[in-house]
Image: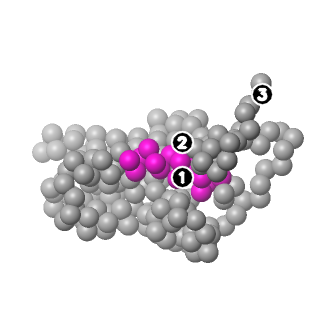
Amino acid sequence: MQTDPPLGPADELIGGSPPPGPSAPRPKPRRATARFMLSHPLHLLSLGFGSGLSPVAPGTIGTLFAWASFTVLSRYLTVIEWGLLIAVGFIGGIAICGFTAKRLGIDDPSPVVWDEIVAFWLVLLMITPVALTDQLWAFIVFRFFDMVKPPPISYFDRRLKGGFGIMFDDLVAAFFTLLVIALWRMSV
């Protein structure tokens, strides 16, 4: 099967070039550093404005960044604006996360936390207004689903690749978080 060559930087951004074949050497994985993050604006977004550079639990730190930014931005954004931001953040995140993952030479690099940010914004948007303790429980449940990846999250994590795969498994984790919260609210 013949594939078209990439058309340029925009085509590379959306994953237009084929993955290296068995005979093509895979690029050596790079480490995400502050210098790497500042080398391109898309890296700044995908690495969560530096939150993904944490040497310990970057996904958790990225989710904490999502929580803090949601708290700050909620003073200025309406529910509709949040919905648009999350939708654009998810769709754009496919290209953004895929671009950074490709540059790092890793399928789903842990420093890429834009997926956690967008997914947790969705969780917070759907449960707000709630008390701080309820937000904390949402954080804990979301982190559980994102880290443990029980089925079907693990299925999507293994099967879906590229930027879409990076974004989608966190969206499923957000769905299960919201399901647990809804079931808990129904039982109270």
- Judge whether residue 79 is colored magenta: no
Which quarter of the rendering shows the N terminus?
top right
Is residue 98 on the magenta stretch?
yes
Residue 19 placement (x, y as % from top left) = 72, 41
Q: CA distance from mark 2 to mark 1?
A: 10 Å
- What amino acid is labelled 3 in the image? Gln
The residue carrying pointer 1 sits among few (fewer than 14), some (14 to 19) or many (20 or more) residues within 10 Å by Cα, namely many
Q: Amino acid at mark 2?
A: Gly
Q: Are marks 3 and 1 in contact (CB under 8 Å)?
A: no
- Cα distance in 3D space between marks 3 and 1: 26 Å
Query: Residue at the spot x=19%, y=54% of the render?
Result: 78
The region drawn magenta spans 88-102
Q: Nearer the viewer, residue 169 or 50?
A: 50
Identify residue for label 3: 2
**Residue 34 to residue 89: above or below:** below
What main secondary structure does the magenta stretch of the protein show?
helix
